[in-house]
Image: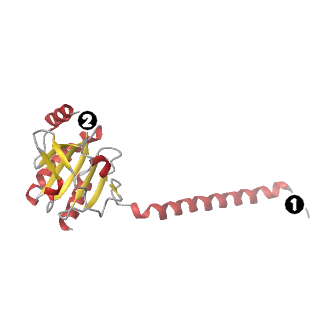
Amino acid sequence: MIKRSSDLQPRRGRLRTWIAIGLIAGVVGTMVIVFAGRFGMDVRLVASPLVGRQAPSLEFDYLDRPGTLDTDDLNGQVVVMNFWASWCLACRVEHPILMAASEKYADQGVRFIGVQHQDLVNSGKAFLDELGWGVNFDYVIGDGSGAAIEYGIYGIPETFVIDANGTITMKITGPVTTKSLGTAIEAALVG
């Protein structure tokens, strides 16, 4: 008995359906395996080769007053170092969060350093006059300090949290959130 091609059509259709289901299941399964470790994590908390290393020793000129800030003088304090610029829209978004955190953690000895990056001094001052100067916050000029190279800055905003031993414990790429910054600071305070 010879089977006609019309008899084979339903079998081919079912085979194609099962192949498609198998491929979809394979893709979904692969995605679950690849991304399962990242679910529930804030994607702004970035793995960086600097995490776990000593923070670079740097000297910055202050943005708003004469004198310099030597990062070696910050040993023994938890430090939040935020790279920002007045022309950066994401920096505007995160600024109120940084200001609130600087107030919240002032009594716990956390020091905030705002490093103005690739910007004009007067533009930075105008930005802070408009949006507010943080409490327990030092604003410094990053250009010429070597900070961008030492910290490997490739885009702003970028924020580093440094523990009391001078070790970089966290890097946050993009605008901080209350959660990402709080998690990073709390970890540095405990560590």
Nearest the viewer among 17 and 100 is: 100
Write down the quadrant of residue 109 in the picture.
bottom left
Write down the quadrant of residue 118 in the picture.
top left
> Which residue: 39% across, 61% down?
38
Q: Mark 1 is on which residue type?
A: Lys
Q: Position of residue 93 (x, y in %)?
A: 25, 41
Q: What number is the disc on residue 3?
A: 1
Q: Is residue 175 visible?
A: no
Write down the quadrant of residue 26 in the picture.
bottom right
> Which residue: 19% across, 65% down?
165
Q: What number is the disc on residue 119?
A: 2
Q: Mark 2 is on which residue type?
A: Asp
In this picture, is 141 found above or below 56?
above
At label 2, counting other C-alpha atoms closer than 10 Å, the crowd grade (few under 14, some 14-19, many 20 or more) is some
Q: Residue furthest left?
A: 107
Q: Is residue 4 left or right of residue 48?
A: right
Q: Is residue 101 left or right of residue 31?
A: left
Please identify the quadrant where the C terminus is shown: bottom left
> Which residue: 12% across, 38% down?
64
> Which residue: 36% across, 46% down?
154
Q: Position of residue 86 (x, y in %)?
A: 24, 35
Q: Is residue 20 visible?
A: yes
In this picture, is 87 found above or below 84?
above
Nearest the viewer among 150 and 43 is: 150
